[in-house]
Image (cartoon, grey):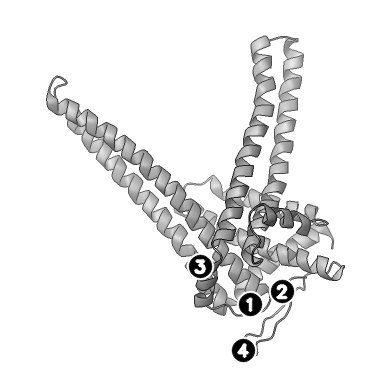
């Protein structure tokens, strides 16, 4: 398959999954939307209440003489509020991580069933999530650790030469400009490599959801094997999603936040379609193109190929 054309086909197929299989995809997507929506609302309410409480204590602090016990009590309460806020932030980050993972697993289950032309009721999906929650969690934790390690290694490889250059100040301005250009080129290459690695890790999460008993490093290794031969296509898909995420991430409006949330839900569908396409390519030894229009007959239980 021509790589750019294959990227468009995968993205179009992911968009068509909802319209073709809306009887079970829409309830599953709405269910997957609940954790993210509740966490988003809870985060805004928590920040709003903490800011109001902090402002109220500061106003009270301004009306009390510094040498009085009430002033000391207000300072202690401000310190206590700061500690409680940090604990709340940690809890919110953990809850957001788990909520996003649960939403991703639900979307992958629904999209995988739609790719195979099967109907997946919400009750069945919930039972699958309860039975296989450890696999996506373990894989996602490994992917997160690898991501943090890669970011730290890349930053150190870029920052150390620049700091040495700033400390030594040798070689003149021409060498300084050369090192800055080299650091910028290395940072760009590191970012592009991270886009590819993030694609493999995302497919690994899909593998841990779809394949029974496959999780952790085993799922990530299987994802690398699955995308072999279609690395360029997977990289371009990940690059398109990253550009879309960056485009909607600059805005702070409600529309931008909603678009960011929709994109976060769309990405697992894309990687699920890409995973099934890669599996079919490995299964029959040939690479097929996605059909322009594929319909799923739910009433007669017909199973057709959503991706090839």
Seen at 74% across and 71% down, the residue is: 307
Q: Which residue is mark 3?
A: 130
Q: Secondary structure at mark 3?
A: helix
Q: Which residue is mark 4?
A: 299
Query: Which tag is nearer the camera, tag 1 or tag 4?
Result: 4
The residue lying furthest to the front in this view is 213
Is residue 1 placed above or below 83 in the rendered structure?
below
| Of callouts 3 and 2, the N-terminal one | 3
Taking 140 as reference, is 196 left or right? right
Q: Which residue is mark 2?
A: 306
Query: Which tag is nearer the camera, tag 3 or tag 2?
Result: 3
Seen at 49% across and 69% down, the residue is: 30
Kindly indicate whether the residue at mark 4 contacts the one at mark 2 (C-beta within 8 angstroms). Answer: no
Compare residues 183 and 255 and report the one nearer the observer: 183
Q: Can I make out residue 77 in this image? A: yes
Query: Which tag is nearer the camera, tag 2 or tag 1?
Result: 2
Find the distance from the CA under tag 3 to the CA under tag 2. 26 Å
Q: Secondary structure at mark 2?
A: loop
Q: Secondary structure at mark 1?
A: helix
Seen at 45% across and 47% down, the residue is: 93
Kindly indicate whether the residue at mark 1 contacts the one at mark 2 (C-beta within 8 angstroms). Answer: yes
| Of callouts 2 and 1, the N-terminal one | 1
| Of callouts 2 and 4, the N-terminal one | 4
Find the distance from the CA under tag 3 to the CA under tag 4. 28 Å
């Amino acid at each position: 398959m021509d790589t750019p054309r294959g990227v468009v086909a995968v993205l179009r197929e992911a968009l068509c999954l909802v319209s073709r299989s809306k009887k079970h995809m829409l309830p599953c997507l709405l269910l997957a939307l609940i954790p993210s929506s509740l966490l988003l609302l809870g985060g805004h309410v928590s920040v709003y209440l903490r800011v109001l409480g902090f402002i109220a204590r500061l106003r009270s602090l301004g009306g009390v003489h510094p040498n009085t016990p009430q002033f000391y009590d207000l300072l202690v309460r401000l310190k206590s509020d700061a500690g409680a806020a940090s604990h709340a932030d940690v809890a919110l980050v953990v809850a957001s991580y788990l909520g996003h993972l649960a939403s991703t697993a639900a979307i992958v289950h629904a999209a995988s069933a739609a790719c195979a032309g099967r109907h997946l009721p919400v009750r069945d999906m919930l039972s699958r999530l309860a039975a296989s929650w450890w696999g996506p969690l373990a894989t996602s934790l490994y992917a997160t650790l690898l991501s943090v390690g890669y970011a730290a290694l890349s930053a150190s490889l870029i920052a150390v030469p620049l700091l040495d250059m700033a400390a030594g100040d040798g070689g003149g301005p021409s060498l300084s400009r050369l090192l800055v250009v080299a650091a910028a080129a290395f940072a760009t290459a590191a970012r592009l490599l991270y886009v590819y690695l993030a694609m493999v890790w995302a497919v690994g999460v899909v593998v841990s959801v779809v394949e029974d008993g496959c999780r952790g490093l085993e799922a990530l290794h299987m994802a690398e094997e699955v995308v072999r031969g279609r690395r360029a296509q997977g990289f371009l898909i990940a690059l398109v999603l990253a550009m879309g995420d960056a485009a909607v991430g600059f805005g702070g409006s409600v529309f931008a936040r909603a678009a960011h949330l929709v994109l976060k839900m769309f990405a697992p569908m894309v990687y699920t379609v890409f995973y099934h396409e890669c599996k079919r390519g490995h299964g029959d030894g040939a690479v097929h193109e996605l059909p322009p229009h594929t319909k799923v007959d739910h009433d007669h239980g017909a199973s057709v190929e959503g991706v090839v």
